[in-house]
Image (cartoon, rainbow, N blue to C red):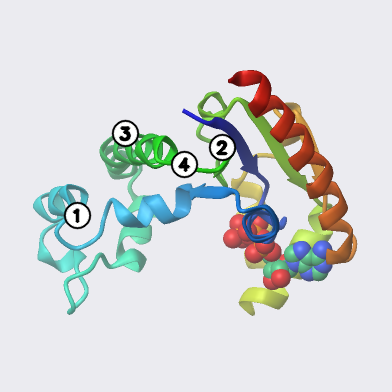
Amino acid sequence: MALVIGLTGGIASGKTTVANLFQQQFGIDVVDADVVAREVVEPGSAGLNAIVKRFGNQILTPLGSLDRAQLREIIFSQPNEKQWINALLHPMIRQRMQQQLQQVQSPYALLVIPLMVENNLQSLANKVIVVDVEPEIQIARTMHRDGVDAKQVESILASQATREQRLAIADYVIKNSTENQKLLPQITELHQKFLEMSRENL
Ligand code: ATP
């Protein structure tokens, strides 16, 4: 399997922006935990079937896909059910991420896991990049992107790992507090490093 570089960061830190640059500039294959988490509950999947078995058809939208708002409500209000859902889906997500990593064609893979620290998933990567910004910037960018108020963003921030906890698992840090143009030089430097590492791995 190719060298796996993990990428994490708090809400609106710039993970997607960074991953897109690795992909577009250097052709690096990206495996994204959020995408995989949606795939394991697609209509017809074993994941969705198990959820329907437990919560009934009312957990589905009229079109037959998972009603995420309802699932969020269950997770929020019933800790036992949250545990059940995690126990069901986390192994599926992990397995599917592994499968996708095995198919990677680029010299190394980028594995984007927003909740890497919270779910203790850093061991899935050989090295970890943390995208780092000040909480004030996270709040401003989320408000701007999602049209939500500061209070809502603050409660999401409070539910995530702290900046310090994230930095503690970082092998590399990408700073994204200033304008976007500052990202490419940092990414280019890391890309060269990872290419070298992938050659050494052969
Ligand atoms: P989430 O985990 O919430 O999905 P994310 O970490 O993937 O977020 P992005 O979606 O890449 O973050 O970025 C969050 C928002 O901030 C986006 O609207 C993006 O365009 C903007 N953004 C990212 N980097 C910068 C920057 N350096 N300057 C200004 N805006 C930025």
Locate residue 88: give its quadrant: top left
Q: Residue at x 22, y 68 (%)?
A: 65
Q: Secondary structure at mark 2?
A: loop
For residue 116, the mark is: 2
* Viewer-nearest of discs 1 and 4: 4
Q: Which residue is mark 1?
A: 48
In 3D space, how far apart are the residues under numbered discs 1 and 2 (Cα atoms)? 23 Å
Q: Amino acid at mark 3?
A: Pro
For residue 91, the mark is: 3
Q: Secondary structure at mark 1?
A: helix
Locate residue 91: give its quadrant: top left
Q: Which numbered disc flags the more N-terminal residue, 1 or 2?
A: 1
In 3D space, how far apart are the residues under numbered discs 4 and 2 (Cα atoms)? 20 Å
Q: Which residue is mark 4?
A: 104
Q: Amino acid at mark 4?
A: Val
176 versus 107 height, above or below:
below
Badge 4: residue crowd in 10 Å (few <14, some 14–19, many ≥20): some
